[in-house]
Image: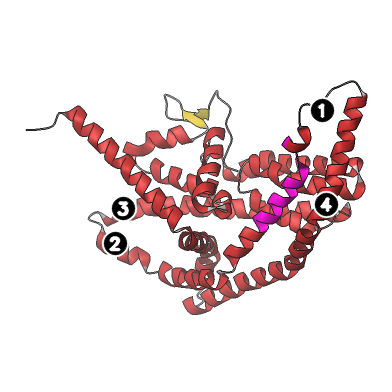
Amino acid sequence: MEKSPDRLRTSQILFTLASFVVVVAGLRAASQIVVPFLLATFISITCSAPLFWMRGKGIPAWLAILVVMVGIILIGFIITSLLGNSIDDFSKNIPRYGAVLNGQYRNLLFWVEEKGVDVSNLELVEIFNPQKAMQLVAKFFNSLGEVLTNGFLIIITVIFMLLEASSIPAKLHSIFRNPDDSLAQIERITANVKNYLAIKTIISLITGVLVAFVLWLMKVDFPLLWGLLAFLLNYVPNIGSIIAAVPAILQALIQHGLGRAAGVAFFFLLINLVMGNAVEPKFMGKGLGLSTLVVFLSLIFWGWVLGPVGMLLSVVLTVTVKIVLESREDTRWAAVLLGSHVPSVSGEVTPDDSPGTDAR
């Protein structure tokens, strides 16, 4: 007895959902292996541009890879040397910072009560505990440090990926039935992902350097630490900038009072407005935009699946999925749902009427 088209379609949908659940559960269970592999993949994609540039200049493959890997190791060593002590000192001072913040917060509530507002029954001290923000930052850096303990594994994986990069097109050419069309599609996807990662990394780096420099000028402790946090969280649109600003503002509040904290907040706002709304859209364009809801949900989803690193890579992973969906006609509808812009009748991309954000 043949199944009706509706029952067959329902079965396919249920099978797809079941497969998705199994894959997600597998990723979460194997996160300790998946996270280093994902980091190695994105590092390889980012480093492939200088690698192929050197290959185009006639430099042998082994020497080009050696130069790239020395650069990666050197950058990692500099970051570890500069920030290792800062992270330790910051973690040790969290109890003292928490006591100061709680004292200032209670004084603020007392001042509000003096103005005739009854806040005694609201339990605001328990709900809005500023010490928890500093503890979350320390937990985030500790989790990131645990991932980076697999640095040797990540570097080895990057080396092998870069070694295989030149031979992958030939292998794929022998696999596909229509290699020209399939390879052209894969090259478009890879080029879009590579361009996105390169532009995002450069802009995030500039943002982190500007934040560290401003905090150093304002004599806020641990400027390199907050610059690194701004660099990492700049991969998360809108939400990341707010999260990165909170601990730096609290640090300025602890050290120098409300006036300096307001100044730090102003410069964070200025830097992110300039980089996020002026510089980045000029180079990134509108094609990789994600809606605000998708950004928020991807942050929660990938953070739950892969932990803190998943939160950092959430938008990158979602943008990659969107690029893949856009490459096929039968899945382009899903890419439109993920995006912050809707195509007009003529096929041009126009801004959506609902609030949205670009993947910046």
Mark 3 or mark 2, earlier in chain: 2
Amino acid residing under circle 1: Ser
Q: Is residue 266 above or below residue 51?
A: above
Q: Is residue 48 above or below residue 181?
A: below
Q: Which residue corresponds to mark 1?
A: 120
Q: Which numbered mark, 1 or 3, is in the foreground of this view?
A: 1
Crowd band around label 3 with a 10 angstrom C-alpha radius: few (<14), some (14–19), many (20+): some
Mark 1 or mark 2, earlier in chain: 1
- Residue under the image location 35 percent in, 38 percent down: 331
Q: Nearer the viewer, residue 222 or 324?
A: 222
Q: What SS does tag 2 mark?
A: helix
Q: What SS does tag 4 mark?
A: helix
Q: Is residue 337 above or below residue 215?
A: above
Q: Are marks 4 and 3 in contact (CB under 8 Å)?
A: no
Amino acid residing under circle 3: Ser
Q: CA distance from mark 3 to mark 2?
A: 8 Å
Q: Which residue corresponds to mark 3?
A: 182
Magenta stretch? 127-141
- Is residue 44 magenta-colored? no
Farthest residue in the left direction? 1
Q: Which residue corresponds to mark 2?
A: 173
The secondary structure that dominates the magenta segment is helix
Mark 1 or mark 3, earlier in chain: 1
Amino acid residing under circle 4: Tyr
Give the x, y percent position of residue 106.
Answer: 86, 37
Mark 4 or mark 2, earlier in chain: 4
Q: Are marks 3 and 2 in contact (CB under 8 Å)?
A: no
Q: Which residue corresponds to mark 4?
A: 97
Mark 1 or mark 4, earlier in chain: 4
Q: Determine which of the numbered discs, if any, sits on residue 326 in the image.
A: none
Q: Nearer the viewer, residue 32 or 270?
A: 32
